[in-house]
Image (spheres, rainbow, N blue to C red):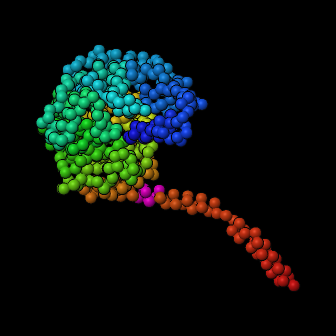
Amino acid sequence: MHYVIYLQKKARVQREMTLQDMYNQDSFDDDDEEDSDWEPMQKHVEIMKWFCTNCTMVNLDDIVHCDICGEHKESGILRHGFFASPFQDGLMDVESEVKEKYKELRSGVSVSSSCTAIGFDERMLLHSEVEMKSHPHPERADRLRAIAASLATAGIFPGRCYPIPAREITREELKMVHSMEQIEAVELTSHIYASYFTPDTYANEHSARAARLAAGLCADLAAAIFSGRAKNGFALVRPPGHHAGVRQAMGFCLHNNAAIAALAAQAAGAKKVLIVDWDVHHGNGTQEIFEQNKSVLYISLHRHEGGKFYPGTGAADEVGIQGAEGYCVNIPWSRGGVGDNDYVFAFQNVVLPIASEFAPDFTIISAGFDAARGDPLGCCDVTPAGYAQMTHMLNVLSGGKLLVILEGGYNLRSISSSATSVIKVLLGENPGCELHHCAPSKAGLQTVLEVLKIQMNFWPTLAPHFTKLQSQWEIYASKSKKKQIKKVRRAEAPIWWKWGRKRLLYNILKGHLRVKSKGY
């Protein structure tokens, strides 16, 4: 998540190495100062480059497709979403099929009967990084534009979903989640042209309002869904929120939208709220806010790698504090590249068993799509079908009272296709290919077993899952051990190689003489 800082440091190092900087820093001898007409032999050559619209990665000007994601230099993804061809500024062939598919549905669906609500306001697009850096910031307004373009092209929004009016969250509502110091720090940015909470968490004069709008939309969606005015909803909002804690804004996040939505649902009458966070980064802010609260169950699936992956929190043994142990469930992946099978496997054996026992009245998904295939920060492998399947699995809880809130996700094609797949499930469509019998990776199985061993102390329903998977692990480990032994034996050097040339000759001669003496 901090590659912007890395690029800045890299650029600074390179800048210190130039001849011009050495000259300006008076690093030449005194005799050189007399050479007033001295000019460097090599003139500075400006390298032309462009940044990919889809993934923000830098490319040389003479190539037309991004070296990282393959997106065309003149991509139309901001006009047509993921339906835009990645190879040129146009539409893929499927676009006509999509419009034809939804033409009939759109003509027969009125706003009143559309039960899926969307929270969106264009003023959130004004939140941007003012200072020009060596690389575009990944959390950018184009994220919302690409999703909105995809939904419009598919005829989903506007069309099958309806908007809720936007409002700014009040200070009184924010105080239920954040400290006054944090609230005032965010407010202060509205009087500053450009500012930073952390090196990667920026603000401009529009950021505070954007954060209030995002939080207000999430709160109102939660209240509308729980009260029955909407069946479910998707909050197409930014800045994201799950890193924002009680006292600090960080990790691109200013106000914690999911936490505000959870309390809004409780204010509307929900007694128990479930938050499932599948953003690739641990939602340290959400965990901090609710780690002492037994009425909110927080479950997070994220890359952790022993605390080496940002933000470093979210180990399996972080379970809640002060009487709320077990109401914080962390599923920390030990590596990158985690895909659909591991996520669905974790849902089947950890998320759903605990959630079902908790029996929430309202469910929130902190839906970061940075674990998606192609994301430059998450480097994982979850597909749109995987996100759709997880949404479908959670939709059976809380009587379908489900709110999905956008968090991270920085590859526009990945984030827009994944968000569209999730919203289709909210609209009642099947997730497509169902992933019932998912074989996890070895690392994924180890992580799930680690979590079960800890969490079954608080959730008895997990014990059968642990016993079953433990036996599977023992069989797997036994097979792996046998394979390992075979490999070792196959690789074992012959005895004559171990002896060496002199000892081999000695043993051959010794054996020959022994045989000869017996013959006499």
Q: Position of residue 461 (x, y in %)?
A: 27, 53
Q: Residue furthest right?
A: 520
In the picture shown, does residue 103 fall above or below 227? Answer: above
Identified at 29% across, 19% down, the residue is 159
In the picture shown, does residue 209 fall above or below 313? Answer: above
Q: Total number of numbered labels?
A: 0
Q: Position of residue 486 (x, y in %)?
A: 59, 60
Q: Which sits in the foreground, 203 or 473? A: 203
Q: Which sits in the foreground, 280 or 107? A: 280
Image quadrant assignment for residue 112: top left
Identified at 25% across, 30% down, the residue is 192
Quarter of the rendering occupied by the C terminus = bottom right
Quarter of the rendering occupied by the N terminus = top left
Horizontal relation, residue 67 to residue 328: left or right: right
Identified at 38% across, 29% down, the residue is 132
Horizontal relation, residue 345 to residue 23: left or right: left
Q: Which sits in the foreground, 223 or 291? A: 291
Q: Residue furthest bottom?
A: 520
Image quadrant assignment for residue 167: top left
Segment tinted magenta in the rendering: 471-476
Asked whether residue 236 is in view, the answer is no
User: Is residue 475 magenta-colored?
Assistant: yes
Image quadrant assignment for residue 142: top left
User: Is residue 275 magenta-colored?
Assistant: no
Q: Which sits in the foreground, 309 or 3? A: 3
Asked whether residue 316 is in view, the answer is yes
Per the picture, the main secondary structure of the magenta-coloured stretch is: helix
Identified at 23% across, 32% down, the residue is 189
Q: Position of residue 111 (x, y in %)?
A: 22, 19
Q: Position of residue 258 (x, y in %)?
A: 24, 38
